[in-house]
Amino acid sequence: MRLSVIGCGYVGLVTGACLAEAGHDVICADIDASRIAQLKAGQTPIYEQHLDKILVSAGKAGKISYTADAGEAIRFGDAIFICVGTPPRPDGSADLSAIDHVAQQIAAEARSPKLVVEKSTVPARTGIELQRALSGYSRGNGGFRVASNPEFLREGTAVEDFFHPDRIVVGVEDPTAAEQLREIYRPILEHQFTCPVHNGKCPDTHKAEFLVTTISSAELIKHASNSFLALKISYANAVADLCEKLGANVEEVTHAMGLDPRIGTQFLKAGLGFGGFCFPKDIQAFISLAATVGVDFEILKAAERVNKQRIDRFFDKVSKALWVVKGKRVAILGLAFKANTDDIRFAPALEVMKRLLEEGADVHACDPKALEKAKRQFPHAHYHDDPYKALEGAHAAVICTEWDVYKKIDWDRAGKLMARKLVVDGRNLYQPEKMKALGFEYSSFGRE
Ligand code: UDX
């Protein structure tokens, strides 16, 4: 099928690339002409595992193309996936102006009926408004049908998540739109693709459910799912605080909790809390959406508060351990908001770095992928590709991102390089007894 993707950020580029790799003819558009130039030059503007590989193969197969001219893209596709940003406004509600802008472009540029698919994360009822706007901007003769198709991709595993979804949710007002979307996803649903992640030998071939509902329900499913995952993390972090007070071990507590399939082991990892461009803004948008209809989403406000407290708690641990922070050399291991991404948006690590710099610490940071982006935000810190360089002469090491490479640090060697054998672990990567046996002063979350 001929598909258009408007917005080449994480969601748009992964969606466009994977749909092209699955056999559709895809054109990707973005207002950022330099990003389009990069893509046309065969460069991948974001770090996402396997993405560069499928952009190359889909490009070679002539299945994907790029344009900075939205009109060209709009006229090309039978279905148009809107994947533009919906950043938070100061009051926490989602800024939908980019979606509205695309709606005006579609009404002006389309020359044939279009299925307009919302893929950006939006508050419930956005699709209804979009449908109304399209008909208004096209003076009622547009032939546009709107559908919602929220994505559940995680950064770092987005390509795998696209080809191996737990579910594909479509929200429609008419069944023909649902049928068109089922056709678009048929290769994924029926495993008719060569998986770029598992080179065709996919371990798990469970059949994803293709779930058809209304537009508003589909939109709400996204916010409700993300907010619940964030809530689960904050619950684990609140339990961690209790464990510290009661002398229990949060890792053992959450492990035992997770063995109950009604709870599940995932997203119960206590630590520095959640960051990234999804959870923080989706919780805010959901709280603000609820407020517009008179619902006080207290439980999510609490989850947000617990999450924000993580930085304070962590900084208390670091300053207590160091006694005086000013003038101390502190190594920060990990800057990205989580492992396997170069994304530092709303990264807890950057909050920690900001506080350390404000306190006059001599910060030496490292991260396998996010250094360049962090340097632009915090030019005053020192940056190292090699964690052992960052640890050299350090009075303390603070662990902020759960990269595998940091799980394998040789602390015997690191201890000899450091000025003081002191580790404050914000991601509970190490065993307290092992670190203490190596002569380290060691603290983490929910374990003492
Ligand atoms: C999330 C959702 O998982 C995904 O379905 C949605 O489409 C977009 O938002 P992402 O933001 O990429 O994806 O990150 P995710 O892997 O969910 O992690 C979010 C944050 O929670 C990270 O900062 C991570 O470090 C933190 N986290 C995750 C925890 O602190 N504890 C956990 O147990 C799991």
Image: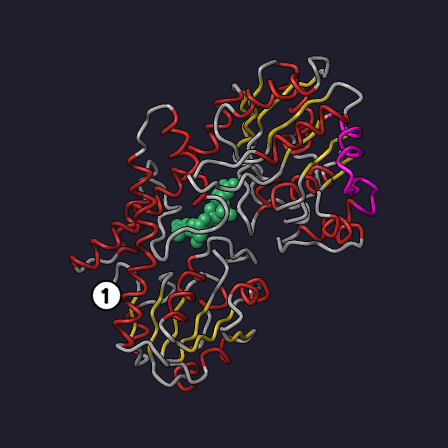
Q: Which of 76 and 376 is in front in this view?
A: 376
Q: In which quarter of the image is residue 83?
A: top right
343 sits to left or right of 1: left
Image coords of residue 356 (percent x, y): 38, 70
Q: Quadrant of residue 4?
A: top right
Magenta residues (range): 59-78
> Please, is residue 182 above or below residue 205 in the view?
above
Residue 307 lies in the magenta stretch:
no
Quadrant assignment for the N terminus = top right
Q: Which of 148 and 199 is in front in this view?
A: 148
401 sits to left or right of 246: right
Q: What element carries label 1?
A: loop
Residue drawn where x is 54% and y is 76% of the image: 386
Image coords of residue 241 (percent x, y): 23, 55
Residue drawn where x is 32% and y is 26% of the image: 295
Q: How crowded is mark 1: few (under 14 residues within 10 Å), some or many (20 or more)?
A: some
> Please, is residue 112 above or below residue 446 in the view?
above
Image coords of residue 207 (percent x, y): 56, 31
> Please, is residue 318 above or below residue 82 in the view?
below
What kind of colouring is applied to the model shown?
secondary structure
> Please, is residue 258 above or below residue 419 in the view?
above
Quadrant assignment for the C terminus = bottom left
Q: Mark 1 points at which residue?
A: 448
* Three-letter amino acid code of the residue under disc 1: Glu
